[in-house]
Image: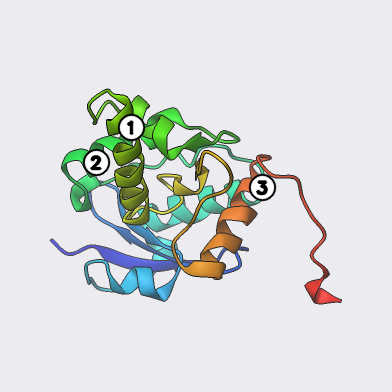
């Protein structure tokens, strides 16, 4: 069965997000049109305001962006993930809550998806980086909370994606707010 798509307005630097839902839950969430293009097609919801799934997503996103919600607490359809990818993303979603960050290596460790050993840890951290980059459930599975051991690390979408990561980490209190002088 094809997912149903709708748009949710956000204050993010990338603007609105595209969300796909199924009977099981949220299947995909995309920050940018490029992310959306890489996800499975499906029809647009005819009336998102009348669809309980779309209403729940919009309400919880609005509360999160307004600082009134720390956990989106929405059902997730994991069908676009499998194997180690699913294991790592589920560990991220379950164990790294609002206002916390984790390094790629730490996430590899807590996920339990990789063998122990010093030489394996560096490889596992790189694999986790690739998994985070392929996350089809942006924001719901908080890839923005995964950082490099020595800094922010990367985020899909280049400079625009990094602006989203900084925005979200600032909202969650992981980064100090800064004055944006670009508007002056």
Instruction: Give the colouring mode of the picture.
Output: rainbow
Residue 140 — which label?
none
Please state which of the two labelled residues, at mark 1 or mark 3, is closer to the viewer.
1
Circles 1 and 3, Cβ within 8 Å, touching? The answer is no
Q: Residue at x 79, y 74 (%)?
A: 182
10 Å crowding of disc 1: few (<14), some (14-19), many (20+) = some
Check the image and report above or below for 50 versus 37: above
Dividing the picture into quadrants, the one containing residue 88 is: top left
Residue at the image position 40 percent from the left and 34 percent from the top: 105
Q: Secondary structure at mark 2?
A: helix
Q: Earlier in the sequence, mark 1 or mark 3?
A: 1
What's the distance in space between the residues labelled 3 and 2, CA to CA?
A: 26 Å
Name the spot of residue 183 as percent of width and height, x first.
81, 75
* Residue matched to label 1: 121
Q: Of callouts 3 and 2, which one flags the residue occurring earlier in the amino acid sequence?
A: 2
Q: Residue 2's spot in the image, x, y percent?
A: 17, 64
């Amino acid at each position: 069965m094809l997912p149903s798509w709708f748009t949710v307005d956000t204050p993010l630097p990338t603007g609105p997000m595209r969300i796909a839902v199924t009977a099981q839950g949220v299947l995909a969430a995309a920050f940018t049109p490029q992310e959306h293009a890489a996800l499975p097609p499906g029809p647009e919801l005819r009336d998102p305001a009348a669809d309980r799934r779309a209403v729940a997503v919009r309400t919880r996103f609005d509360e999160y962006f307004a600082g009134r919600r720390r956990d989106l607490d929405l059902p997730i359809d994991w069908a676009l993930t499998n194997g180690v990818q699913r294991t790592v993303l589920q560990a991220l979603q379950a164990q790294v809550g609002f206002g916390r960050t984790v390094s790629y290596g730490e996430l590899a460790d807590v996920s339990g998806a990789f063998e122990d050993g010093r030489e394996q840890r560096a490889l596992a951290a790189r694999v986790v980086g690739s998994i985070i980059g392929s996350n089809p459930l942006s924001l719901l599975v908080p890839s923005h909370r995964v950082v490099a051991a020595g800094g922010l690390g990367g985020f899909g979408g280049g400079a625009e994606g990094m602006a989203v990561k900084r925005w979200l980490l600032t909202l969650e209190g992981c980064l100090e707010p800064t004055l944006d002088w670009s508007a002056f």
